[in-house]
């Protein structure tokens, strides 16, 4: 029996048929309808039914970009997909496809994937960070996905580092993700005077080709990333921090200075026991993690 993992993004729903070891056997995609629940559900359940036509499916896992209440299983907050708010997606989907369904915050699902069959396999104390448009995170503590009292834990990207800082998508000011994320990189680049159409990728390419300002942008971003890692290391005495997400295409340009900053700011003994590494499963961590959560229901 295999499992279906779904990763709901702002523009598309990625779906994978995943075997019990975490290998993706087949993938599909459908557009995300963000403001009409019926349309959203119809696209999502069609993906599941397509797999059901050819495979025996045991359960479905769904990674949701938002806060899911672990007691009621209702999605409480989902800034990018408003039609999901106050919806019990698990019940709605289960009714239609007649399979067990579990949902989880998408970064938590990614963390679970890296823990079960990715870079963090074999660890028991691990944090997963995903640097994309925003900064997502998930915690594995004592060998389990830690979701807190109500299921909302792991919103490290929205910890405040500057009360007078940049406005964040969450409505607050100065969240870590306003600096350490793809949008953070673009904002830093613009503040430093880079002009024209800017994306994290464009800034990265400029840095690779010797643009001093772009290099400074990455150094500054990496320094904040490293300080954030030091905070996690000192707080949780981790074995590993796994970093994924589209921005990590920059690889060592971010990781090396981030490790240096983490070494400066964390207790030496705690830093020594923690490795900061790249994700192994990006860009499929969300799909695989959702499927593995369904496996371990
Ligand atoms: Zn925020």
Image (cartoon, rainbow, N blue to C red):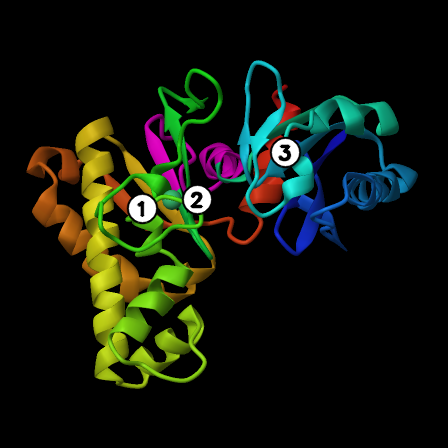
Was residue 123 drawn as part of the magenta stretch in this picture?
yes
- Cβ of mark 2 under 8 Å from ligand 1: the answer is yes
The quadrant of the image that shows the N terminus is top right
Report the Cα–Cα distance between label 1 and label 3. 22 Å
| Callouts 2 and 1 close, C-beta under 8 Å | yes
For the point 32% across and 74% down, the residue is 190
Quarter placement of the C terminus:
top right
Name the side, left or right, on which 268 lies relative to 3: left
Callout 3 secondary element: loop
From mark 3 to mark 2, how far is it between C-alphas?
15 Å
Name the residue that disc number 3 marks: 85
Would you identify the image quadrant in which residue 184 lies? bottom left
Which is more toward the observer, 190 or 50? Answer: 190
| The residue at label 1 has a CB less than 8 Å from ligand 1 | yes
The answer to whether residue 8 shows anywhere in this view is yes
Circle 1 residue: 175
Residue at image location 36% in from the left, 74% down from the top: 204
Q: To which residue does mark 2 refer?
A: 170
**Mark 3 or mark 1, which is nearer the start of the sequence?**
3
Q: Which of disc 1 and disc 2 is earlier in sequence?
A: 2
Please report the residue visible at 34 percent of the width from the left and 82 percent of the height from the top. Answer: 206
SS assignment at label 1? loop
Find ligand 1 in the image and state its quadrant. Answer: top left
Q: Could you tell me residue 278's position as x and y percent?
A: 37, 52
* Range of residues picked out in magenta: 108-128
Residue 137 lies, in percent from the top left, at: 41, 40
Q: Nearer the viewer, residue 7 or 126?
A: 7
x 35%, y 25%: residue: 124
Q: Is residue 149 above or below residue 258?
A: above
For the residue carrying disc 1, how many other residues have a C-alpha within 10 Å: few (<14), some (14-19), or many (20+)? Answer: many
Say which quarter of the image contains residue 37.
top right
Q: Residue 237: image x %, image y %?
A: 21, 29
């Amino acid at each position: 029996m295999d499992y279906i993992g779904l990763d709901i993004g702002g523009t598309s729903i990625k779906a994978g048929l995943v075997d019990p070891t975490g290998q993706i056997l087949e993938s599909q995609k459908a557009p995300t309808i963000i403001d009409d629940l019926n349309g959203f559900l119809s696209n999502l359940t069609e993906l599941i039914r397509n797999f059901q036509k050819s495979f025996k499916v045991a359960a479905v896992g769904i990674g949701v970009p938002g806060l899911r209440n672990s007691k009621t299983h209702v999605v409480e907050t989902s800034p990018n997909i408003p039609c999901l708010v106050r919806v019990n997606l698990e019940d709605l989907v289960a009714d239609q496809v007649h399979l067990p369904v579990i949902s989880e915050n998408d970064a938590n699902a990614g963390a679970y994937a890296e823990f079960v069959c990715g870079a963090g396999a074999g660890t028991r104390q691990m944090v997963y960070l995903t640097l994309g448009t925003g900064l997502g995170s998930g915690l594995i503590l004592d060998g389990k996905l830690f979701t807190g009292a109500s299921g909302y834990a792991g919103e490290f990207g929205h910890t405040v580092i500057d009360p007078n800082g940049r406005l964040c998508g969450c409505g607050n000011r100065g969240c870590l993700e306003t600096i350490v994320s793809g949008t953070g990189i673009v904002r830093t680049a613009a503040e430093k005077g880079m002009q024209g159409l800017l994306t994290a990728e464009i800034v990265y390419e400029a840095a690779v080709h010797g643009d001093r300002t772009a290099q400074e942008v990455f150094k500054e971003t990496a320094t904040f990333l490293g300080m954030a890692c030091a905070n996690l290391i000192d707080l949780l005495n981790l074995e590993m921090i796994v970093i994924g997400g589209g921005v990590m295409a920059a690889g060592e340009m971010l990781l090396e200075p981030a490790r240096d900053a983490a070494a400066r700011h964390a207790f030496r003994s705690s830093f020594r026991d923690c490795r900061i590494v790249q994700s192994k499963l990006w860009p499929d961590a969300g799909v695989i993690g959702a499927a593995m959560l369904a496996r371990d229901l």
